[in-house]
Amino acid sequence: MSEAAFTPRVFSGIQPSGNLHLGNYLGALKRFAEAQDRGVETLYCMVDLHAVTVWQEPADLRRATRELAAGFIASGLDPARSILFNQSQVAEHSQLAWVFNCVARMGWMQRMTQFKDKAGKNAQNASLGLFAYPALMAADILVYHGTHVPVGEDQKQHIELSRDIAAKFNHDYGVEFFPLPEPVIEGAATRVMSLRDGTRKMSKSDPSDMSRINLTDDAETIARKIRKAKTDPEPLPSEAEGLEDRPEARNLVNIYAALADMSVEQVMAEAGGQPFSVFKPRLADLAVDRLTPISIEMKRLMHDEAEIDRILADGAGRARAIAAPILRRTYDIMGMVSAPGG
Ligand code: AMP
Ligand code: TRP
């Protein structure tokens, strides 16, 4: 294994927590599917071991993992070209995570804003896993020598920690073994906001189902949610600058642009000056057109659990084939004695 030149390899993970929505599709799934068309090796992981850092009902976790896999495939991800798998099937993630628990420092972990947010006031009662979460995340990426990590802005701090862990390992053992992975942050146009409040992200945890379009919504529900989306009384401006102080209008234009694969400027050239009574039905038609095939395919796959499980097992086997030699070499660098010929 060459230790200095790293072949570009894309890795990303999503927690299986149910309720996939338009934000997940435009901000993650669609982009992940596009990355596989650029000829780079791509690995996408349902991170079930991360999910259980907070309590998960077993039946819900099982269902959410399969639903996420179905969402990936329905969004255009080709399991023959990308490696699609769930984390717990590849033991090397946990094994390298232990090593990284010994590389990372308590002080680094204490600075993580996601831990502070998730642990809340009662940090003493948070799981040890929640505290160590970023070391497992570093292992997810580095057990494949992953170089590029598409994530949302909120994960940037964790990727920086992965770089710190890789750099400290390399430094402590005097090797150039792990690459320093780079975050690939989603663009503003793919940050989808709530349909009820243009200043908040569309989110699965929003109590109002009207705030988001779920990937399992049928055509009628999608159209109704867009019709009822919050807007202001003005027609659309004729130029993109006119959207600056109009978060709801900007969100609908951004969604249109992302679904139509157009730039915001192109949408404005076409739809500028239209009242929402004209623009919303057009957006609804477009959304139904793009999302219905996804929801149909997701439902089909969800009815075929055996097919999903087979795809995940196949992905796990291919993932392990990359991870096992990297873990073995890591142990060797550290001075762990291995079985002869092993
Ligand atoms: P989450 O549902 O927060 O676990 O996020 C899963 C993936 O979807 C991550 O890559 C997020 O960055 C992305 N994502 C979640 N919500 C949105 C949103 N409203 N707009 C764009 N991307 C999102
Ligand atoms: N922490 C990420 C999130 O909550 C999910 C994740 C786990 C991940 N391991 C990863 C993302 C590795 C990218 C690379 O969204």
Image: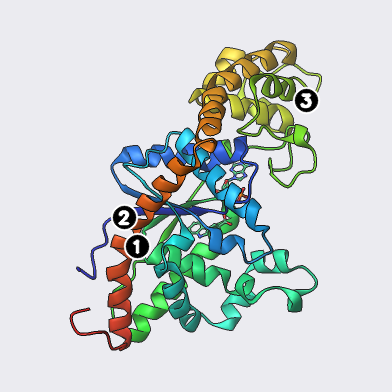
Amino acid type, residue under disc 3 in the picture: Thr
Q: Dot 1: what SS? A: loop
Percent across and percent down for residue 79 are 37, 42
Q: Residue at x 42, y 50 (%)?
A: 312
Q: Secondary structure at mark 2?
A: helix
Query: First in sequence: mark 1 or mark 3?
Result: 1
Q: Circle 1 sits on which residue?
A: 144
Closest to the camera, between mark 2 and mark 1, is: 2
Q: Residue 209, located in which quarter of the rendered image?
A: top right
Q: Return the residue at label 2.
A: 318
Of tags 2 and 3, which is closer to the observer?
Answer: 2
Q: In the shown orientation, is residue 178 left or right of residue 309?
A: left
Kindly check if marks 1 and 3 are in contact, taking CB atoms under 8 A apart as contact. no
Query: For the residue with label 3, is its CB less than 8 Å from the closest atom of ligand 1?
Result: no
N-terminal of the pair, mark 2 or mark 1, is 1
Display colour scheme: rainbow
Horizontal side, residue 100 vs residue 144: left or right: right
Marks 2,1: beta carbons within 8 A: no
Instruction: Identify the residue at horizontal 29%, vertical 76% (top origin).
Output: 328
Q: CA distance from mark 1 to mark 3?
A: 45 Å
Between 38 and 44, the one lying in front of the other is 44
> At which x and y percent is residue 338?
27, 85
Task: Decide if residue 115 is in sight here.
Answer: yes
How far apart are the two marked residues, 2 and 3, measured between alpha carbons?
A: 47 Å
Q: Report which residue position mark 3 lands on.
A: 231
Residue visible at 78% across and 18% down in the picture: 234
At numbered mark 3, what does the secondary structure look like: helix, strand or loop?
loop
- Tell me: residue 176, above or below residue 253: below
